[in-house]
Amino acid sequence: MTVTESFEQISPLFDVRQTTWGGRACFSKQSLKKGSVILEADDNTGTSISYEFRKEVCHFCYSYHNGVTLKHKITYALLKQLIKNNDNKLINWKKFQGAGLWFCSEICRDEFLSQPHIIELIECYELLLNHFHSMQKRVNPDDSREDELNHVKISKDLIQEKWDQIINDWIPSIDKLKLTKRSNRLPVISEDEYCCARFVCETLFRLKYMDQNSINFKSFYSLQSNEVSKMERFPILLHFQILVFKTLYILLPSFLRDRFSVTSFRHILGSEYGNAFGIWEVGESSDSREYFGYWIFPRASYFNHSCDPNLTKTRKGRTMFFTLNRDIDVGSELDIDYSGVLSLPVKERRKFLHDSWFFDCQCDRCKLEMQLIH
Ligand SMILES: C[S@@+](CC[C@H](N)C(=O)[O-])C[C@H]1O[C@@H](n2cnc3c(N)ncnc32)[C@H](O)[C@@H]1O
């Protein structure tokens, strides 16, 4: 199957084709007018709200109200009906703490609760929350090791070696233990690891109930991974990932653990590093808006970057829109801005893209401006 065939259902408006300069990219199948919506994506496979915004950003519509703590949480009373069919006793539901979910209104909370099988995700979030709270009382041994962990010389082989140790030594040692003893092996985690574990849970959950023939499912598994580049830049991430993996391996209930492996975990995080979209505050100018976290829209992850993009990304609630900001001809490459630094001079812009996104930008504007300064 060619790249185009496997992605042809993403949109009737564009193809995904292999390029010689930037992996796969999207090309318009027809000439189109400024203002045309090229893609509307509301099918994210995973979201992560930063810890500091967890009580202030609605977990359904992602609205934000100037830092005001949101009023609406899920309660035991609301869950009773959902628990009935799903009570596997890992949680004392009567002591339910709200699973770390806050909502701006009853409508958003109820919409969240109406998602099929959502009790499974709520249960995972609650287990993680309980674990995180118990770990907050403990000293985190990594607090004094940050420097050391950030000086590890990362290579593809080292990453593989560390994961092989997990597969060959750590997993069998956990599997041998009685269920009641496994929790003694849970690592201490920080806020960032807690948020990352929630992101992985949601991704596993969404993939579990997604049609495997759907374009979103196929697009997710074809996402490019930036694992090595990102870890070379931030070596501590290898240790970070291993802590998150161990936490989930021990805590995840069987309904999600069945699909959880080193391979799936590495793809979920490796692809997040090159493909995540920021969840930004709506309605503020780009230099003063808040950054709440990130999410993954696999179908929208084949747009390359350009420093003179013809698509503008906007968020409305849970949906991302990709809209043409000028007329285009058939065959035009469809590009977005990854950087938010388009006003910088060419060298600084390219350095930013290289350091944050790990590629040397091949867009036409960079080519032209580089020629002009040489
Ligand atoms: C979100 S993905 C876009 C789809 C990607 N080309 C693929 O084949 O999966 C981002 C990756 O595409 C490549 N890319 C995007 N824009 C580029 C550009 N302007 N120049 C060079 N490579 C680019 C980089 O490898 C980057 O990490």
Image: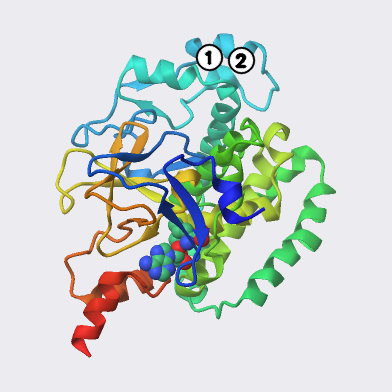
At a point 40% along the width and 19% down the height, the residue shown is 109
The quadrant in which residue 318 appears is top left
- Residue 244: percent from left, percent from top: 58, 52
Q: Which amino acid does label 1 sit on?
A: Leu
Of 70 and 320, the residue lying toward us: 320
Q: In which quarter of the image is ligand 1?
A: bottom left
At a point 45% along the width and 72% down the height, the residue shown is 21
- Residue 67: percent from left, percent from top: 22, 36
Residue 209 lies, with reference to residue 144, above or below; the image says above
In-image side of 87 versus 16 (left or right): right
Question: What is the crowding at mark 1: few (fewer than 14 residues within 10 Å), some, or many (at least 20)?
Answer: some
Residue 190 in sight from this viewpoint: no
Q: Is mark 1 on a helix, strand or loop?
A: helix
Q: What element carries label 2?
A: helix
User: Quick one: quadrant of the C terminus?
Assistant: bottom left
Give the labeled residue for mark 1.
79
Q: Are marks 2 and 1 in contact (CB under 8 Å)?
A: yes
Residue 49 in sight from this viewpoint: yes
Give the labeled residue for mark 2.
83
Q: What residue type is labelled 2?
A: Ile
In the picture as drawn, the residue positioned furthest to the right comes out as 176
Of 302 and 89, the residue lying toward us: 302
The quadrant in which residue 166 appears is bottom right
- Residue 221: percent from left, percent from top: 61, 49
Mark pair 2, 1: CA separation: 6 Å
